[in-house]
Amino acid sequence: MLTVKDLVAGYSNMPAIHGISFEVKQGQIVALLGSNGAGKTTTLRAITNVIRPDSGSVTYKGKSLAGVPSYKMVELGISMIPEGRHLFPKMSVLDNLMMGAYSVKDKSLIQEKLETVYEIFPRLAERKRQLAGTMSGGE
Ligand SMILES: Nc1ncnc2c1ncn2[C@@H]1O[C@H](COP(=O)(O)OP(=O)(O)OP(=O)(O)O)[C@@H](O)[C@H]1O
Ligand SMILES: [Mg+2]
């Protein structure tokens, strides 16, 4: 499904990853393990074209992702979830959840997914009008 081949990328002409290759098949969950500064985030940034790879290739469902802008990748189904607890603190809980569906056009699908999220995390339903920045860490 996702094939990364000989990917080289870094910052200011200084490579941080030196030719990484791996494959993610349909239905698989793949974890990248490495020490701090090893290049995990850089790998994801290069896959999503947040930084331009120096060389190598990334293909998704058989198509090259070279030059595809990051926001288009979200529509293809590739997205990065921020590290830590990044929210939009001045937006409501509901608006934060809706941000996760901004590329989905089908309103009934959005509603269905929202209900699923509320079922898993009932506290979010109770607090949907509250500013996200006023929730506790766990909430
Ligand atoms: N914006 C940046 N500008 C310059 N160098 C950077 C930048 N971001 C990361 N680096 C450097 O690139 C290398 C790889 O960093 P990266 O963020 O990919 O590591 P990581 O594996 O995600 O680490 P961590 O586990 O700490 O999140 C490190 O040497 C880091 O200092
Ligand atoms: Mg990282």
Image (spheres, rainbow, N blue to C red):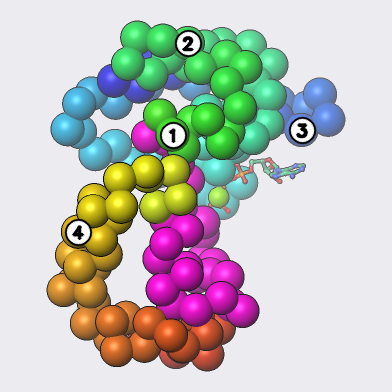
Q: CA distance from mark 4 to mark 3?
A: 41 Å
**Label 3 SS:** strand
Specify which label sits upstream in the sequence, 4 or 3.
Answer: 3
Taking the spot 37% from the left edge, 43% from the top edge, the residue there is 105
Number of the label disc, if any, that sits on residue 11: 3
Q: CA distance from mark 2 to mark 1?
A: 15 Å
Label 1 or label 4, whichever lies nearer to me, is: 4
**Label 4 SS:** helix
Residue type (three-letter) at the residue carrying disc 1? Glu
Disc 4 + disc 3, Cβ < 8 Å: no
Q: CA distance from mark 3 to mark 2?
A: 22 Å
Residue type (three-letter) at the residue carrying disc 3? Tyr
Number of the label disc, if any, that sits on residue 10: none
With 65 as the anchor, is 24 left or right in this view? left
With 14 as the anchor, is 2 left or right in this view? left
Residue identified by numbered label 4 = 112
Residue identified by numbered label 1 = 75
Query: In the image, is the residue at mark 1 within 8 Å of ligand 2 by its beta carbon?
Result: no
**Label 1 SS:** helix
Label 1 or label 3, whichever lies nearer to me, is: 1
Taking the spot 56% from the left edge, 36% from the top edge, the residue there is 71
For the record, the magenta segment spans 77-100
Q: Pick whichever, 20 or 112, lies toward us.
A: 112
Residue identified by numbered label 2 = 64
**Label 2 SS:** strand
Residue 100 locus on image (x, y percent): 42, 55
Residue 87 locus on image (x, y percent): 53, 69
With 82 as the anchor, is 2 left or right in this view? left
Q: CA distance from mark 4 to mark 2?
A: 32 Å
Specify which label sits upstream in the sequence, 1 or 4.
Answer: 1
Residue 87 in sight here: yes
Whether 22 is among the magenta residues is no
